[in-house]
Amino acid sequence: MKIARFRCSSFPLRPLAMTLLFTITGASPAFAAGKITFVSQGGAYQEAQTKAILDPAAKQLGITINQDSIPDAWPQITAQGETGKPVWDVVDTPPANCLRGGRAGLLEKLDFSKLPNAASMPEKYRTPYSVAYEFYSTVIGYNKKTLKKVPHSWKDFWDVKNFPGTRALRNDPVTVLEAALLADGVPRDKLYPLDVDRAFKKLAQIKPDITVWWTSGGQSAQLLHDGEVDMEMIWNGRASAVMKDDPDIGFTFNDGILQNTQLCVLKNAPNLNDAMRFINAALSPDLQANLPLYIDYGPGNPAAFKTGKISEKRAAELPSSPANAAKQALMSEDWWASEQGIQAKARWLKFMQ
């Protein structure tokens, strides 16, 4: 078998960071029909998808999958796209990057008639240039031991009188503005376009009661683990990791903000045909159902929950299971990629000064 070199950063995007030195993918050189270069975000997340999806897809398609990892793919998408001769093929990245990359002519527009597994997915899980690959959630984590009552919604989180305790929020407007509006009574399916003025007004109410504004997933996990805060905004994978060490820690998917990363293909990718074949294979229900075996993130393709591979108990722990998805608001990356979203981010900087 061919050994594909894998340069992996220790970037803790959401999972706990781990380093992979190499991975074995694809068929033997005598039988390998092609190759692609696949790029993701590294750490335990990329290790999990290698076992769950990349290695099986490579074997299924008879191709070699070379891997790279980078915390933020956008600068390279821009740089490689502008040359017209990129070295990457498929990138796993937030939908906002896919949207602005596609609109700038840096990414291939997907022909969903040739991607049956992608075409069968909900339209809200796709853009013209990308399709959902995996899901995670921004949720409310809490310490059951230190709180008399645990919060079950952002309204509870904002209610410092009836839910006293130390609090932490992310130092980023993305998801925090959504949480503020949910706390103020906006229905989950009516969030967008975000009422930015209303969100900042609601945030001003809670700002004096926020002990920490965290800046990384690792920091958010440490805050709960060390008991520095009683409740906080946190990614579900981080909360799950802390729960394994401390049974007093819990979280709720109720009022969560459901997010995903998506697969896109660079314009004029060197292995375009194999890249498209890979995307279709990677989104098959069977391979998608493998991901929860290795990490606490949900499959991008909802049909994975119908394969029989994911037990009811495991589904209850995953952000994209039908029952949990129904309790959450789906993030609109399209809104955040718009001029309104850009202005909201600029306003956030002033708010935090």
Image (cartoon, rainbow, N blue to C red):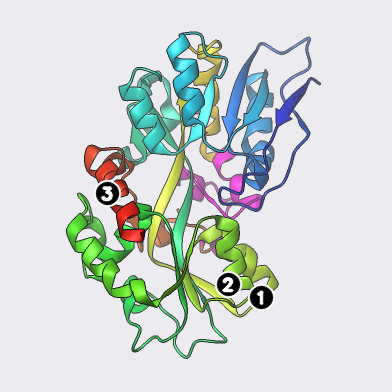
Residue ID at (39%, 76%)? 152
Give the labeled residue for mark 3. Answer: 344
Residue 230: give its label: none
Which kind of residue does numbered mark 3 sit on? Ala
> Where does the image place residue 306, in percent across and percent down from the top left?
49, 49
Q: Which element carries disc 1, helix, strand or loop?
A: loop
Q: Is residue 302 above or below residue 149?
A: above
- Magenta residues, as a range? 286-315
Q: Quadrant of residue 129?
A: top left
Give the labeled residue for mark 1. Answer: 246
Residue 224: give its label: 2
Q: Quadrant of residue 137?
A: bottom left
Q: Is residue 35 above or below residue 211?
A: above
> Where does the image place residue 233, in percent across and percent down from the top left?
45, 65
Q: Judge depth for marks 2 and 1 and give the one in front.
A: 2
Q: Is residue 350 above or below residue 33?
A: below
Q: CA distance from mark 2 to mark 1?
A: 9 Å
Which kind of residue does numbered mark 2 sit on? Leu
Q: Which element carries disc 2, helix, strand or loop?
A: helix
Which kind of residue does numbered mark 1 sit on? Asp
Let me know if residue 187 appears in the view: no
